[in-house]
Every structure is written in structure tokens, then in C-alpha cells.
Image (spheres, rainbow, N blue to C red):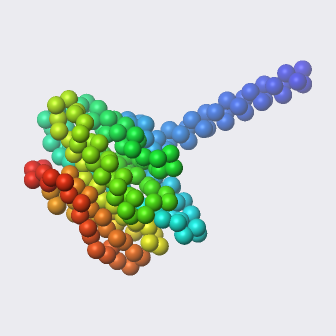
């Protein structure tokens, strides 16, 4: 009788642990794309900055936005827009390494956190992502992405994200379908460099 009771308690704990694990997974996963979500990214960014500061290792961040996504949604409908988001997520995932952290930040914006990666390595990956999206057909739609890149230089998590996000805005202003890097430090966003293939002059 006692053994049966202990077995029931053990099985109950196992089910509870499994349910809690699934709940944690759901709270950290984007429902549409299956990528990590914004909550998971914010937590990971804080941890990676802490590790990079202690170990004095490089860390870079990409902030990615699908160009003219609102127009696409208006013209083709939200269901098609969802399929585009899913496909873009898949293509980005194919480009990252196992130690990289890819997430959907919100809407048509994605982020990729790159541990042990200096700025030049991040720019190389950003260009691979840009080309991958540009070279894939989306049911007859030509899609492109703009990317802002920033490297950790001792600043806070918020400052690092802001640097990459501002670089993304500059990429939009440059004509989209390009990569802009902001060399952020703890006190300034520094200079901005641009990697631009063929600018897309179309405006939203």
C-alpha cells in the first residue's frame, strides 16, 4: 500500500514538473514562428552581457526588420503575412550557429544575439541573412530585410539594443535592403558604417 502511494506521488510530481516545463517553454516561445520571443531575448541578452563582461569576450547583436511588411499585409492579407514571418524565421534559423540566439522581437522585427562574435563576424552573418531573404521567392513577392548591427563595448543591455535599433533605422533611411552598423560604447553610439547592395528606393 505504501509503495503504491509513493509511486502515485512520484508520478504526480513528474506530471507537474512536465506541465511546468511546458508552461515555461510557452512563455518564452513565439507562438507563430516557434522562435524565442521578446521575453526570452531580454533575459538572454542580460545573461550574455554579463558573461561577455566577465570573460572579456566579444558579443554582437543584429536587429532585423522585413522591408515594407505593412504594404505586404495590406495587399496580400494577414494570413499571407503570417506565412512570410514563418518563412523568414526559418531562413534566419538556417544561418545562425548553435550558440547564437534568434528571436522574434515583435511584429516583423527579429533579433539575433551572437556570443563570441566581433563586429566583422556579425556583419558577415548579417550579409548572409540579407542575401538569403533576397534570393528566396515568397509566392511571387520580392522580399528584403534591413539590418542594424552593434557590438558590445561595455554598455548596458538597453544601450546595446538601442545602438543596433538606431542602426536599423539608419538602414531604413539609406533605402532599405542594407546593413548599417553602429559602433556603440558606454557613452556614445560612435560612427556608423553602411553596407548597401542595391538600395530599394520604394517608400512605405
User: From what the image shows, is residue 110 above or below residue 3?
Assistant: below
**Which residue is the extreme one toward the left?**
202
Which residue is situated farthest in the bottom direction here?
Answer: 187
Residue 145 left/right relative to 98? left
> Is any part of residue 61 visible from this angle?
no
Across and down, in percent, residue 86 comes to 34, 35
Q: Quadrant of residue 17?
A: top right
Where is residue 183? Give x, y as percent: 34, 70
Q: Is 5 positioned to the left or the right of 16 in the image? A: right
| Residue drawn at (36%, 52%) of the image | 125
The quadrant in which residue 122 appears is: bottom left
Q: Is residue 117 above or below residue 188?
A: above
At x 49%, y 58%, the residue is 115
Task: Let me know if residue 55 appears in the view.
Answer: yes
Residue at 38% from the left image edge and 79% from the top image edge:
187
**In this view of the protein, which residue sits in the foreground, 62 or 193?**
193
Q: Quadrant of the N terminus?
A: top right
Q: Which percent across, then down, holds residue 92? A: 36, 43
Quarter occupied by residue 87: top left
Amino acid at each position: 500500500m505504501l509503495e503504491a502511494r509513493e509511486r502515485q506521488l512520484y508520478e504526480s510530481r513528474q506530471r507537474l514538473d512536465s506541465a511546468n516545463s511546458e508552461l515555461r517553454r510557452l512563455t518564452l516561445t513565439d507562438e507563430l514562428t516557434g522562435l524565442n520571443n521578446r521575453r526570452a531575448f531580454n533575459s538572454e541578452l542580460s545573461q550574455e552581457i554579463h558573461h561577455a563582461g566577465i570573460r572579456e569576450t566579444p558579443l554582437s547583436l543584429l536587429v532585423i526588420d522585413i522591408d515594407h511588411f505593412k504594404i505586404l499585409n495590406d495587399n496580400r492579407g494577414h494570413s499571407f503575412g503570417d506565412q512570410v514571418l514563418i518563412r523568414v524565421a526559418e531562413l534566419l534559423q538556417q544561418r545562425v550557429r548553435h550558440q547564437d540566439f534568434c528571436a522574434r522581437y515583435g511584429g516583423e522585427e527579429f533579433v539575433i544575439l551572437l556570443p563570441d562574435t566581433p563586429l566583422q563576424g556579425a556583419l558577415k552573418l548579417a550579409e548572409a541573412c540579407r542575401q538569403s531573404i533576397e534570393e528566396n521567392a515568397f509566392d511571387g513577392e520580392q522580399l528584403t530585410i534591413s539590418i542594424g548591427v552593434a557590438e558590445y563595448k561595455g554598455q548596458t543591455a538597453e544601450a546595446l539594443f538601442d545602438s543596433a535599433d538606431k542602426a536599423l533605422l539608419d538602414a531604413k533611411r539609406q533605402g532599405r535592403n542594407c546593413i548599417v552598423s553602429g559602433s556603440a560604447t558606454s557613452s556614445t553610439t560612435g560612427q556608423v558604417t553602411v553596407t548597401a547592395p542595391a538600395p530599394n528606393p520604394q517608400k512605405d
